[in-house]
Image (tube, rainbow, N blue to C red):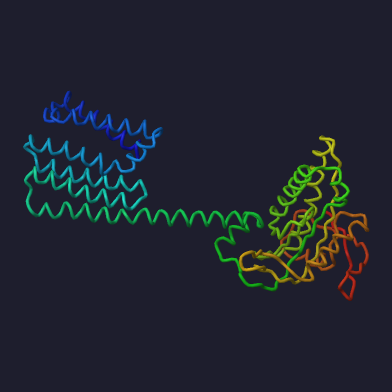
Amino acid sequence: MGQVRFALATAFLLFYGLAITALGEEDLRLTVGHMILYWLIATALLIFGRRNRLFREIGRFAVPLIDMPMVTWIQTTTVSHSERSQTVALFTLALLLFLIVLSSFSLRARHLLLSGAVGIACLAVVYRAAGLSPVSWVAGPLLLAVTATMMSWLPRRQTLLIRETAERQARRDRLARYFSPGVAEVIESHDTPATGESCEITVLFCDIRGFTTLSENLDATEVVRLLNDFHGHMVDEIFRYGGTLDKYLGDGLLAYFNAPVRQSDHAGRAVECALAMVDRLEVLNRDRASRGEPPLRIGIGIHSGTAVVGNIGAANRREFTAIGDTVNVASRLQSLTRDRGVSILASDSTEAAAAIGESRPTPLLFTSAGRVEVRGRSQGLEVFVPSRG
């Protein structure tokens, strides 16, 4: 507000100089001293308001305590020596209306109401000096009062908008932790389901092999840096294929596809994502090798099936997650990658579902790795090692 006041005071002072010297407006000579004084006050408030607390406090109430009295002083002096007193009085009304609007920059309703009350008093002084009719005495102050009252609502509305924007940003930040930008945008435009729903999903379970042995020779800072670096690369791929990050599991992570946004090719997306994660790990390992660090190895299990998905947990600590046998099978397949000597194992249900959905430039191939027994299931299932055709 100090900058606006200084700019306006400077503009009016320049106008005075131009009008007096070029246009011959001699009436303005009567108040040029007033204008110079106002410019000096505006300059002081701008300069010292940034350094001195007293000037900063004065600046907050400068509109009703400085600007409006200065305008009244200048306009009253002009009215008493002008033949166009009514025009000067109406111009005063416009100036006071502008100052009330300027007072709204403080975002405080009490400043606006004070400006409205002082403005009405100042207008009455000018109107009396101009000798205006009783109708003007009613219309002008009423306009100032209505304007101040309406503008006093603005700070409350702005505060509400700021709060809503902050809450929306916080919600967007939470979504960005778990969902790709495209999925987060869809969820943000709709309400995330609060109750669980049973749906078909493809679960991807990833884990670093031998992490316990690897971390024994690292301090806490190095362990955190390693995990952050690893998770950053892997999550990039999950989000790139439209997956949902369920949670981090120490040196591993759990993700799934086809929830909360439906994807007809969710199984294929999960398999392609797993292959891309293995490729991304090679890039990460090259960077680690350049720093003299040992390579990382991962195991990924993928399984398609029915799971319950929704906001689950205590009322004040809920997470959007998936639970059920499908998640457990994917975790078990991840563990079996070590025994089979491969990086990725996909179940027969994922292999069958991967043929459904969108066509791909590069087809997916699945090589059988035999049948496996999964703890908690009465029947085994056939597993496959996926690759690109």
- 317 sits to left or right of 113: right
Q: Position of residue 249 (x, y in %)?
A: 77, 57
Q: Position of residue 145 (x, y in %)?
A: 22, 54
- 318 sits to left or right of 207: left
Q: Residue at x 8, y 42 (%)?
A: 129
Q: Residue at x 31, y 46 (%)?
A: 103
Q: Residue at x 81, y 67 (%)?
A: 328
- 321 sits to left or right of 370: left
Q: Report the front residue among 337 and 97.
A: 97
Determine whether 59 is above or below 236 in the image. Answer: above
* Res 109 seen here: yes
Determine whether 1 is above or below 297 in the image. Answer: above
Furthest toward the top, the residue is 21
- 233 sits to left or right of 282: left
Q: Residue at x 21, y 26 (%)?
A: 17
* Res 389 seen here: no
Residue 374's quadrant in the figure? Answer: bottom right
Q: Position of residue 251 (x, y in %)?
A: 79, 53
Residue 92's quadrant in the figure? Answer: top left
